[in-house]
Image (spheres, rainbow, N blue to C red):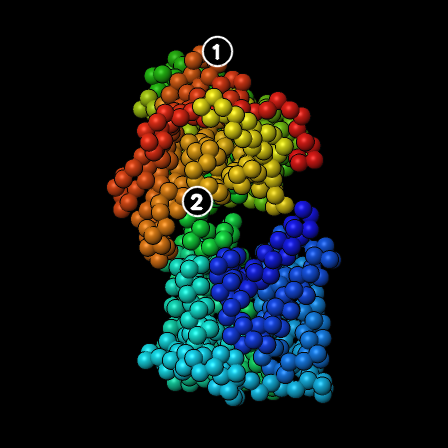
Amino acid sequence: MVKEHKIKSLLNAILNSYSQIFFSENKFFAVLLFFVTFLDFWAGLYGLLSVLTANIIAFILGYDKITIKKGLYGFNALLVGLGTGIMFVPGFELTVVVIFAALLTLFITVALQGILAKYALPYLSIPFLFGIWAIILATKDFSSLGLSERGIYTYNELYALGGKNLVTLYDWFSNMPVLESVKIYFLSLGAIFFQNNILAGIITAIGLLYYSRIAFSLSVIGFWSAYLFYNLIGADFSALAYTFIGFNYILTSIAVGGYFVIPSERSYLWTVILLPVTVIVTASLGYIFAVWQISIYSLPFNIIVLLFIYVLKLRTEKNEKLTDVFIRQKTPEKSLYLYHTGKEELKNKNYFPINLPFIGSWAVMQAHNGKYTHKDRWKHAWDFIIKDENDKQYKDKGDYCKDYFCYEKPVIAPAAGVIAEITDGIPDNKIGDVNILQNWGNSVVIKHGEYLYSQVSHLKEGSIKVRKGDFVRKGDIIGRVGNSGHSPYPHLHFQMQITPYVGSETLDYPLYNFVIKKNNKTELFTFGKPEENDLVEPAKIDDILSNAFHFIPGKKLQIIKNGKETQQWEVEKDIWNQTFIIDNENNTKIYFYENDSGLFLTNYYGDKESEMFLFFTALYNVRKSFYKNTVTEGIIRPDLFFNKPVMIFQDFFAPFYIFLKSEYKLKYTEKDDDFMPDFIKAESQVSKIIFGKIKETLKFKITIYKSGKTEIKYFDKNSTAQTIAILPLKKHINLAKL
């Protein structure tokens, strides 16, 4: 069994080494590319030998098996083997050279992976360049190796391989009545695998179209952008038909427009912009490398892509229309759909959770860009007060500080951190008066992380009970509301900032897990920015929901369908610390992340007829706070609900417009008792929408019990009532998986 697993892993590594050249792990695409390499038999054979050598040595040396199986240690060696097999006469001597060249390329790959990982940059095909250049330069002294003459007598070689029929087929492809630029496009695709014929390019294009419509469209757009620029500047574009450099434009466009960046109209625009730059780099490098009589191969592609990725990472402000891939999927389409469906959740995942700095319900007297203060560099702040049912913030006439409902109320740490700065000893103002000289009044600044601080101000003199350097936990009392500084009446000023000083410039940063009550409605926010006159309070965590939707690695779940036990699921985490629920028997998996706010299911892999998919669909976005009739919304990847032909059509337009949507809603409807509850009920649905019109709605009724059991009721395609229950198994958790 172990031997079979090793063989399967090696086969995956070999196949993925071929498709990984196009950033793919698609097996059908890999098989097509494997066939393409054997259009020149000896090139294909030496390419395969290189892939085998690199992957076997990687397994023997104990490198990460997932990285090996993805083909990431093999594709550069493949290119070296193909290039060497094309250039030199086959023989024992070349075989020995290819094996050691593959070893060298693997070592360069591993070394560059370690070096560039510090900057979160890929090594692309740089190892191939070092490997192939080393061979070309070294073989000038290798007298046993002869340069290959294959390709000079093409018809003789083809006739020897396949007779007259193969020669006729080759002639037909070579003389196809198509534009010269189209031929050069196919030749450039074939040149990626050192195949100088149109058939190789056509097969590669078919595989690319099958693998990804976005990648295919980018290859076309990128190539013709370069073609038009060549014509504009008067350069000879036909030279690309017999050199191995035209593919630079294709690979650059795919990498920049759809693999390392979320595909969008902006990424396509940058593809068009960067291709002329790639042409300039290609032309200039060609003259420099001619001195050593070696080709530049994929060097322009590597330079432009690495520069672009690095430049994007140095931005101080992120742009949602041009963003790097957060969690890379198997195709650009899946990365795009995942980004759109989980955009808010994924974005919020990067925020350190900062809660409201008080207990109970408060009103926002002044928000960002306030009427009175909160201007310019200090515009991202809030002022909070407490109001009664008559919308008043004080009793009697409000002549004294003690008349105000918020006065002397406790101020708590909004998150864990270290006290960075304190100002105290400033007396409260009389009502209506302000202290301009000591603007912020008594204040506390807490450091929550590098370049992330919170500040509370206008506290009561002598009420601050912490000292500089103290560590505080979320919810610890740090002082009480006063009326010090520029404060005409008691209120609490709260802001986020990147420096530790009282009165620092403010930082535009959302607050975490709170409730806004407005017009007799309650709205839950995982992250958000309260506005003026909003009535806000920290969200209360419900014990039933928190217990049922707390999934830690090692936890096991028993699934019961219509009263019969069917399967077991287990919670695990991968090497990137991503948590997931897996059904090993049926090979289905749900990725998720969980926090105090809720359970967020981010991605699904496997059979869409399974119980796990129903769980994913019914409980896609669950909050851990119960407020009756509150609605949680989300968008699920459309390819999970629409059939393949419709999705293929959508894929072509997805970077510009997504007309297929799967909208999710969940509403809490009932809690059996407010003080000693046994269960909570909810309803959820997923609406399949085409061009804004609902075509179908899947509905679920959900009951969450105190015991941790979750029950989902729904109607299947035959309108038959079905029930799925998910029960936590009361077993010891495997600590090794934590």
Q: Residue at x 72, y 88 (%)?
A: 143
For the point 56% across and 32% down, the residue is 569
Secondary structure of residue under mark 2: helix
Q: Are marks 1 and 2 in contact (CB under 8 Å)?
A: no
Q: Which mark is residue 343?
A: 2
Point out the residue furthest to the left here.
693
Residue 627 in sight? no
Name which residue lies at 69% across and 48% down: 2
Q: Position of residue 275 (x, y in %)?
A: 44, 71
How crowded pointer 1 is (Cα within 10 Å; few <14, some 14-19, many 20+) is rated as few
Residue 197 on image: x %, y %: 46, 78
Under tag 1, what secondary structure?
Answer: loop
Q: Counting residues from the N terminus, which is met first, the one under dot 1 or under dot 2?
A: 2
Tell me the crowding category of disc 2: few under 14, some 14 to 19, or many 20 or more residues within 10 angstroms, Cα based: some
Cα–Cα gap, marks 1 and 2: 37 Å
Amino acid carrying label 2: it is: Lys
Circle 1: residue type = Phe
Residue tagged by mark 1?
675
